Amino acid sequence: MSRRVNVLYDAKTIAARNAELAEEIAASQPERLLAIVVLKGSFVFAADLIRALHEAGLAPEIEFLSLSSYLDGTVSSGTVRIVHDIESEVGGRDVLLIDDILESGRTLAYAKDLLAARGARRVETCVLLEKPGKRAVTIGADYVGFQCPDYFVVGYGMDVAHAYRQLPFVGVVEVDDGQT
C-alpha cells in the first residue's frame, strides 16, 4: 500500500503559531519556569516552542516526562503510568507541561495532577493540537496551537509505527485509495 501525507499545518504556519504561543506564555509572567516535555510525540514542538520562549524573554529549565496509557501500543488502557520521571524539584515553581495532542485528556490530567501534588506553584499546559470531541476527562489546555479535526495526524514529532516523525509539518496519512 502506497502512502502519501497531506499537509494539515505547514512549517511556516506552525512556526508563526509557536511565536504567538511563546508571547502568550511570557505574558503570564511565570516564575522559575520549568518546562516539562511529555515524550515522545511532542519533542519537535517542544524544541521549537522553547526556542520561541527564549525569543520572548524567558529562560525555562527543561525536563522530560514519559507517560504511557497504552497496553499494546494502539489501545488505551485508561490507566496512566510513568515510564520516565523528571529529576527536578517542582515545589514552589511554575511548570509548563508541553504535549503534542490533547485528545482524551487522561495523560495530561494525570501529569498536571502529579505535579500539583508535588507542590508546583502553578501548572499550565501547552499543546500543539487539541481535539475537543475526544475528551474522556475534564481538562482543557491553557495554550493551544491549533484546534485539530478528528484525523490521525503525523509529522512534526508525531508518528505512526515510528514513521513520519521527521516531517517538518503536521499531516494526515492518505492510503492509496484516496481515503484518510
Image (cartoon, helix red, strand yellow):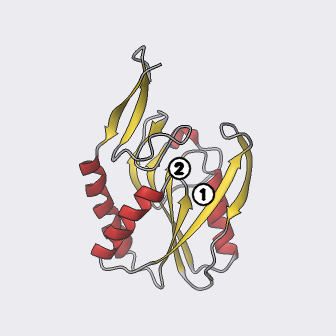
Q: Position of residue 25 (x, y in %)?
A: 38, 70
Quarter-of-image position of residue 76: top right
Percent x, y of residue 176:
42, 17
Residue 102 is tagged as 2
The residue closer to the viewer here, 47 or 22, is: 47
How would you rate the neighbour count of disc 2 (Cα within 10 Å): few for under 14, some for 14-19, many for 20 or more?
many
Residues at badges 2 and 1 in contact (C-beta under 8 Å)? yes
Identify which residue is drawn at 40% across, 64% down. 47
Secondary element at image label 1: helix
| Residue 71 placement, left or right of 124 | right
Query: Residue 137 versus residue 62: which sits nearer the camera?
Result: 62
The residue shown at (38%, 37%) is 171
Rendered location of residue 20, percent (x, y):
29, 62
Q: Residue 29, how many percent across, how many down? A: 39, 80
> Reading the chain from its start, which is encountered first: label 2 or label 1?
2
Above or below residue 86? Residue 75 is: above
The local secondary structure at tag 2 comes to strand
User: Relative to residue 97, is residue 80 depicted above or below?
Assistant: above
Left or right? Give the position of 13 relative to 156: left
Q: Which residue is mark 1?
A: 108
* Residue type at tag 2: Leu
Q: Which amino acid type is shown beneath numbered disc 1?
A: Leu
Name the residue at 55% across, 45% down. Answer: 103
Query: Left of 174 or right of it: where is 125?
Result: right
